[in-house]
Amino acid sequence: ALEILGVLLFSALANNDQFGVIFISDEIEKFIAPSKGKNHALHILKEFLTLKPKSKSTNLKAGLDFIRERIRKKSVVFVISDFIDDSNYLDSLKWVSKKHDTVAVQIKDELEQVIPNLGIIQFEHAETGEKQWVDTSIPEVRRYISKQMDFRSQKLELELKKINTGFILLNTAEDFVRPLHYFFKNR
């Protein structure tokens, strides 16, 4: 996420565009108003690196509603997330997409997609802390987890197309610059 944010910030900087950021967990953690300049970009990156979220939970709806209420000027909005969020954020995203040029950037981790055979291991939900024992030695279990992650991404992509929101899927194990470049080149 930091690298993606850096690329987007320095692209905006090269275009002499204003840029700002909203960091969210299950609440608005920090809002940095749009401005221009290298110092502003470095300030945003520093804030990202030093941010200590109050919560591990995610509420994209809170961030999108904040955009709806506070950002009046038509803007390009990038939502960088894994989109693993139980809040009903699609209605808010639809509204933001109607007013702003909106791009959802989904970050997927390869280990969430392809679970290795590690025997019986304990999974912990990163946001809720809920723990569950899973036998990863069973191929069907690993396939099920993989299919669920694929289904989640495919469903997200379909929903985003319905509401005219751009979509970029990035894998943490792969180079992300090429997919970003491809997206903007074909846009």
Image: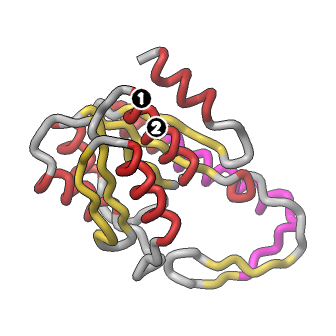
Residues under labels 2 and 1: Cα distance?
A: 6 Å
Q: Nearer the viewer, residue 62 or 147?
A: 62
**Which residue does the image show at 46% across and 37% down from the upper left?**
10
Magenta residues, dominant SS class: helix
**Which residue does the image show at 50% across and 81% down from the upper left?**
128
**Does 3 sit left or right of 113 as displayed?**
left
**Does 45 sit left or right of 160 as displayed?**
right
**Which residue does the image show at 27% across and 47% down from the upper left?**
93
14 versus 79 height, above or below: above
Q: Nearer the viewer, residue 136 or 90?
A: 90
Q: Which quadrant of the rendered structure holds the C terminus?
A: top left
Find numbered disc 1 in the image and state the secondary structure of the residue it sits on: helix
Few, some or many residues within 10 Å of mark 2 (<14, 14–19, 20+): some
Marks 2 and 1: CB-CB under 8 Å? yes
Query: Mark 1 = which residue?
Result: 14
Q: Magenta segment, which residues? A: 133-154
Q: Nearer the viewer, residue 115 or 66?
A: 66
